[in-house]
Image (cartoon, grey):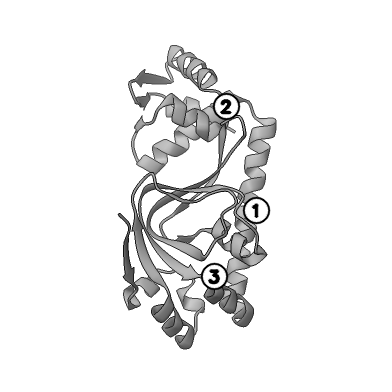
Amino acid sequence: MNKIKKIGVESLQELPFNEFLSAQEKDTLLASAYEVIYPAGKTLAENQTLCENVYVVLDGLIRIYKLSEEGREITYYRVESGEICLFTMGCILEHNPLDAIVLIEKESRLLAIPDYLFQQFMDSNPKFRNYIIRRLLATITDLMVLTEEVTFHGVNQRLASFLINISRLQSKTTIKITHEAISQELGTAREVVSRMLKEFERKGLLEISRGKILLKDIDRLESMSY
């Protein structure tokens, strides 16, 4: 069950754009925005959904991904603590349904800003607007990198890079993840991932066990990544 509560001043201080808001705008947020806690695995929004709020991740992790008609997934990017979900923001600014799926990857505490209020800040506050534009440009750059990865790099390079990134995210050399989850992240077949992991294991780069992968030679994995 989702836990909802009104926000306090301490929540405002966690916002990445807090310094760009006027005192009056902060008061408006206190009156209209709210906090919500979602459990891991919850779908926050999906294809053809009209967004009613822009979400800021105060604590947790959410994933933005696309699901093809064949059932394959590709991850666009993740939104970590202290970041704003730009897909829900774009949905509101363009007045178009969401063209992706927003998944709560681990339990998350979010701050929800009503669509009308976010639009009001964009229209009336140049500093806030400039901050959002900078974040959009950074995300566009990330998506361009993703396009390059999918188009020009082989599965072995993408897999090596993905394993390194997940290891850093979890701060462990033994990462908890299934072959199916990796295939969804990379947008390829599970059989391809399993075959490639077996090849990595044969070369001494890692060790596979049920639901876990131990990275044994991170330096060599990094040299294989892009």
- Disc 1 marks a residue whose amino acid type is Ile
Marks 2 & 1, CB-CB < 8 Å contact: no
Q: Circle 3 is placed at which residue position?
A: 115
**Residue 165 seen from this side:** yes
Q: CA distance from mark 2 to mark 1?
A: 23 Å
Among numbered discs 3 and 2, the one appearing first in the sequence: 3
Compared with residue 226, is residue 143 higher up or lower down, i.e. above or below? below
Report the disc number at residue 188: 2
Q: Quadrant of residue 212?
A: top left
**Could you say which is closer to the camera, residue 221 or residue 48?**
48
Residue drawn at 47 percent across, 30 percent down: 182
Front label number (1 vs 3): 3
Quadrant showing the N terminus = bottom left
**Residue 68 at x, y percent in the picture:** 61, 35
- Disc 3 marks a residue whose amino acid type is Asp
**Residue 133 at x, y percent in the picture:** 63, 66
Compared with residue 107, is residue 149 higher up or lower down, i.e. above or below? above
Q: Secondary structure at mark 3?
A: helix
Quadrant showing the C terminus = top right
Front label number (3 vs 2): 3
Residue drawn at 60 percent across, 29 percent down: 70
Furthest-top residue in view?
A: 202
- Disc 2 marks a residue whose amino acid type is Thr
**Residue 16 seen from this side:** no
Q: Circle 1 is placed at which residue position?
A: 140
Q: Secondary structure at mark 2?
A: loop
**Could you say which is closer to the camera, residue 33 or residue 79?**
33
Check disc 3: other Cα within 10 Å, few if <14, some if 14-19, many if 20+. some
